[in-house]
Image (tube, grey):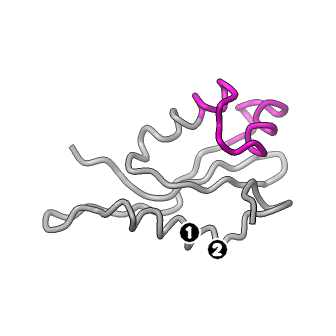
Amino acid sequence: MKFPKGVFQIRNLKNGKVFISSSSDLNSSWNSQKFKLNAGMHPNSFLQQDWKEMREENFVYEVLEIIEDTDEKPVDPMDIKALESILIEQTQPYSEKGYHKK
């Protein structure tokens, strides 16, 4: 079975900050991210703190880019990470714009 792969963001509806990451299964990544956040185990402490203070209903999951597998060539996980890096560089989700550290 093929799963959609690509880059997503979690956006805070109150302050507009974003957390950008990638996944080899975009269908399940939101549930995985929510589980970590609700359990207090998310690796991004800034996002974790806002999630705890502002609650889940103030965040949305948005797919930014999808990379399609082809019959000739499956998507390389390094390509997904490279796309994530490009989108982080373009978006600059630091300080008041996002949850990433420079």
Q: Quadrant of the N terminus?
A: top left
Badge 1 is on which residue?
A: 85
Q: Does dot 2 land on a helix, a strand or a loop?
A: helix
Identify the residue at horizontal 76%, vertical 58% (top origin): 98
Q: Measure how far apart labels 1 and 2 are at the Cα level.
A: 6 Å
Prevalent SS, magenta region: helix
Give yes or no for residue 55 being in the magenta stretch.
yes
- Relative to 76, 73 lies left or right: left
Depicted 66 relative to depicted 58: above or below: below
Q: Few, some or many C-alpha atoms within 10 Å of disc 2 (few <14, some 14-19, many ≥20)?
A: few
Where in the figure is residue 30, as x and y percent of width and height? 53, 39
Q: Which residues are magenta?
A: 34-59
- Relative to 80, 56 lies left or right: right
Q: Quadrant of the C terminus?
A: bottom right
Depicted 11 relative to depicted 81: above or below: above
What amino acid does circle 2 point to? Glu
Q: Which mark is residue 76?
A: none
Identify the residue at horizontal 84%, vertical 51% (top origin): 15
Give yes or no for contact between labels 1 and 2 (Cβ–Cβ under 8 Å): yes
Frontmost residue, 75 versus 57: 75
Badge 2 is on which residue?
A: 89
Depicted 50 relative to depicted 8: above or below: above
Frontmost residue, 23 versus 10: 23
- Relative to 36, 11 lies left or right: right
What amino acid does circle 1 point to? Ser
Frontmost residue, 81 versus 8: 81
Give yes or no for residue 72 being in the magenta stretch.
no
Identify the residue at horizontal 43%, vertical 47% (top origin): 26
Q: How many marks?
A: 2
State which quadrant residue 6 falls in. Answer: bottom left
